[in-house]
Image (cartoon, rainbow, N blue to C red):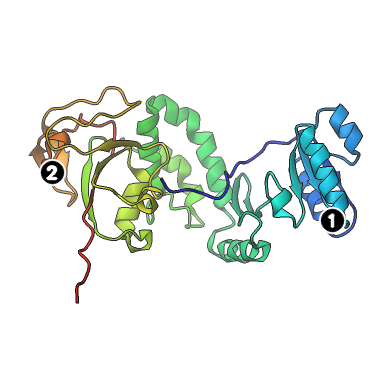
């Protein structure tokens, strides 16, 4: 399984107390960050312990004072960030791109704040300022979408189709937010039962085509034929169901109920519509429209043989 250096989380601190210790140029940015997120700053460790504060930023100039304060705060049950001391941190703060309510956090686990900043600056230029308005429009559309598409997987597929590159709500189009109401009133339908068959020869996710990367990001079910590299699987949705391909029997999928077999109209990897059979049978690019709850990818790992001589 592909690993990540830390678990990225967005912590709601509006109205909550947060301990910030220290003065000067190291502590001030942390105070501004806490205040920007609606937190209430506490600057006394004993008070923070007594009042059950859960987050602490420590920014003393003295290294030993930072170490002592970090130990005391952690022993009191706080999650601790010590400025410029990643080895003492329970969490680190990323470089933030704000398109309220959309936030993009770029972090390096404390390896290089400068690198995170410059990646964020590049993204700042690429992402339109109106992206937050698109997020708010989609939030306002949620009740109507829930009513029209009660099934969560159906809603996700409809939204995915609208947000694809060049589609009606393309996130990189500065005018997309103006089309949310018209899109919601349109005749979009949730497509289900599509099956795509992908053969992969490289373990480097950078070698994926744009189409392959998009399908990995949208698939509901992955059928794995061979030891598909973890770096490739990391590009798939974290909640996508994963089955081991078996050409002789129906794959068994832990945690997914209602998987059916049968035949019917299906969509192959090339986009053609065919009458096909259950994908568990091993028939390439064919599956029942009711076999899977949504988009299914058959991922076949066929690495190129090493060059000899």
Q: Which residue lies furthest to the front in this view?
A: 309
Q: Which of marks 2 and 1 is nearer the N terminus?
A: 1
Q: Residue 63: give its label.
A: 1
Q: Where is residue 246 in the image (x, y as percent from the top left)?
A: 17, 37
- Residue at image position (13%, 38%) is 247
Position of residue 262 relative to residue 24, above or below, is above
- 3D distance between C-alphas at marks 2 and 1: 66 Å
Residue 185: x, y in percent? 40, 36
Q: Is residue 202 visible?
A: yes
Q: Circles 2 and 1: CB distance less than 8 Å?
A: no
Look at the picture and state if 61 lies above or below 155: below
Q: Quadrant of residue 107?
A: bottom right
Where's residue 93, x and y in %?
68, 51
Number of on-image labels: 2
Mark 2 or mark 1, whichever is nearer to me: 1
| Helix, strand or loop for disc 2 | strand
Task: Check disc 1 and report its element: helix, strand or loop.
Answer: helix
The label number, if any, that marks residue 273 in the structure image: 2
Q: Whole-percent x and y of residue 301?
A: 24, 52
Give the farthest residue toward the left: 275
Say which residue appears at 42% left-offset and 24% top-offset.
147
Query: In the image, 181: left or right of 203?
Result: right
Q: Can residue 40 be seen in this view?
A: no
At 25% from the left edge and 37% from the top edge, which residue is drawn? Answer: 244
Question: Which is nearer the eye, 234 or 86?
Answer: 86
The numbered disc on residue 135 is none
Question: What is the quadrant of the C terminus in the image?
Answer: bottom left
């Amino acid at each position: 399984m592909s690993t990540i250096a830390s678990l990225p989380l967005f912590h709601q601190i509006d109205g909550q107390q947060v301990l910030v210790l220290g003065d000067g140029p190291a502590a001030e940015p942390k105070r501004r960050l806490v205040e920007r997120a609606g937190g209430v700053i506490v600057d006394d460790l004993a008070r923070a312990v007594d009042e059950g504060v859960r987050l602490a930023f420590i920014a003393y100039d003295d290294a030993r004072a930072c170490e002592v304060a970090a130990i005391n705060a952690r022993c009191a049950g706080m999650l601790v960030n010590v400025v410029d001391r990643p080895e003492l941190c329970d969490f680190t703060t990323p470089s933030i791109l704000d398109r309220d309510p959309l936030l993009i956090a770029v972090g390096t686990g404390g390896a290089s704040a400068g690198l995170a900043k410059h990646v964020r600056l590049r993204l700042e230029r690429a992402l339109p300022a109106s992206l937050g308005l698109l997020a708010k429009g989609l939030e306002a559309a949620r009740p109507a979408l829930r009513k029209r598409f009660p099934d969560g997987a159906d809603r996700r597929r409809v939204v995915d189709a609208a947000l694809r590159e060049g589609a009606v709500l393309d996130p990189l189009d500065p005018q997309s937010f103006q089309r949310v109401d018209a899109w919601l009133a349109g005749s979009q339908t949730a497509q289900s039962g599509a099956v795509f068959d992908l053969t992969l020869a490289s373990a480097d996710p950078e070698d994926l085509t744009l189409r392959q990367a998009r399908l990995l990001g949208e698939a509901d079910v992955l059928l794995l034929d061979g030891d598909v590299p973890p770096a490739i699987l990391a590009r798939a949705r974290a909640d996508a169901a994963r089955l081991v391909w078996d050409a002789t029997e129906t794959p068994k999928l832990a945690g997914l109920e209602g998987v059916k077999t049968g035949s019917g109209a299906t969509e192959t990897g090339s986009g053609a519509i065919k009458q096909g059979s259950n994908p568990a049978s091993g028939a390439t690019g064919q599956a029942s429209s009711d076999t899977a709850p949504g988009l299914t990818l058959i991922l076949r790992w066929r690495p190129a043989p090493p060059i000899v001589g």
